[in-house]
Amino acid sequence: MNPNPSFTTIANPLAHLEAIVQLLREPFLVLDDSFHIKTCNPAFCHVLEMPVTAILDQDFFGLDQGQWDHPPLRALLMELKEHQRAFQDFELCQSFSRLGDRTFLIDGQSLPQEYPVETTMLLGIRDISDRKRAELKLEEFNRQLIQSNRELQDFASVASHDLQEPLRKIQAFTDLLATELGADLSETGRGYMDRIQNAASRMQTLINDLLSYARVTTKANPFVPIDMEQIVAEVLSDLEFPIQQSQATIQVDTLYGFEADPLQIRLLLQNLISNGLKFQSCDRPPQIRISMEYLTANANFADANATDTADGIQLRVQDNGIGFKEKYLDRIFGIFQRLHSRNEYPGTGIGLAICRKIVERHNGTITATSDLGSGATFIITMPVKQPVIPSL
């Protein structure tokens, strides 16, 4: 028996072809040399929202009141008919009276000339309307994101120059008044002067924190392999005075490398450790532990040395401070959100918002577990390798 029979040995070639077409899940149809539809599958009927009886033997270009008669598509089909020039991924964007706005990708192929039926052309049609709409939404989102980043850059420029200049003058002249006229001021006057100086200092801190928040995206550095042990050592060196002043104990477990923006990871750790120092319990000195694990895809901990098989890292910063009620978990990462008054604990309420923004830029997540009076543990999860995002 011939294992590769020719087309002429098939008893009913058209039935054989139709059986194949009906198996296909993508919309598919067969045209004769007059561009009439000889057969189509249910997927094509579903796309057109028409019964098969209203499609068979119809002129393809006359379907749906001629809305498939698209000049570039007609030209491709003429080339396919006359010169057997196949084509792929022709994009047809059309506003149909019944179907609405649709986008189709169309592939065309001619049948071998020896195929003993009158059909000559095969068309595969994919409805990519949903994908196209998603792509357009993504493009619009990216445009808005670029615009938002430009506005943040403008704000950072204003904040770093125009806002700070008058503030420096306020601070300078109040310092001069306090120095030159302080002895002549009444107690009430000295109180007013102190309030002006404190307000100016808080404003300076607020501007600096807002600049840090804006620069997470506007002044970001590329992702590179980082040395976490070195970064933590530098952060602890910077915080040496508050650590000594609060008599804090810092425990650093084994740390591992991953891809990140080193300056932003440094800022992330500085904010989290500073939080542990600031929100300390009144009856015990701060104890802060920094630990880290590699994660595999199924969220189990990987071999500590298996950097090639790990998908992510989990970084933990644990303290024994005053803690918080977990019902406020979402609130603590919001900008300007505070659980305590400024008189109890100083700050602008931006530190944890900066942490979240940094982690999100690294395609990660940040959360915390805590209970009032029992300290808090901040848990950061990030990929070991950052995805490469093509520029638009």
Image (cartoon, rainbow, N blue to C red):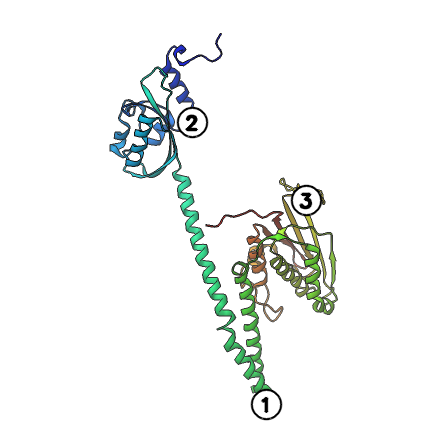
Q: Quadrant of residue 351?
A: bottom right
Disc 3 marks which amino acid? Thr
Tag nearer the camera, 2 or 3: 3
Mark before the other along the chain sequence, 1 or 3: 1
Closer mark to the observer between disc 2 and disc 1: 2
Tag 2 residue = 25
Kind of residue sitting beneath label 2 = Arg
Q: Is residue 264 left or right of residue 45?
A: right
Q: Secondary structure at mark 2?
A: loop
Residue 353 lies in what quarter of the image?
A: bottom right
* Residue at 38 percent of width and 39 percent of height: 129
Residues at marks 2 and 3, CA–CA distance in whole angstroms: 42 Å
First in sequence: mark 2 or mark 1? 2
Residue sitting at the far bottom? 184
- Report the side of 145 relative to 230 (left or right): left
Secondary element under disc 3, as helix, strand or loop, is loop
| Place of residue 32 in the rendered image (x, y in percent of width and height, measured from the top left) | 30, 22
Q: CA distance from mark 2 to mark 1?
A: 87 Å
Q: Picture coordinates of residue 10 (x, y %)?
A: 40, 11
Report the residue marked by disc 3: 307
Q: Amino acid at mark 1?
A: Glu
Return the x and y of residue 247 as percentages of the image width and height: 75, 66
Q: Which mark is residue 180?
A: 1
Q: How many marks?
A: 3
Residue pictured at 34% horizontal, 38% vertical:
102
Q: Is residue 124 visible?
A: no
Residue 277 in view:
yes
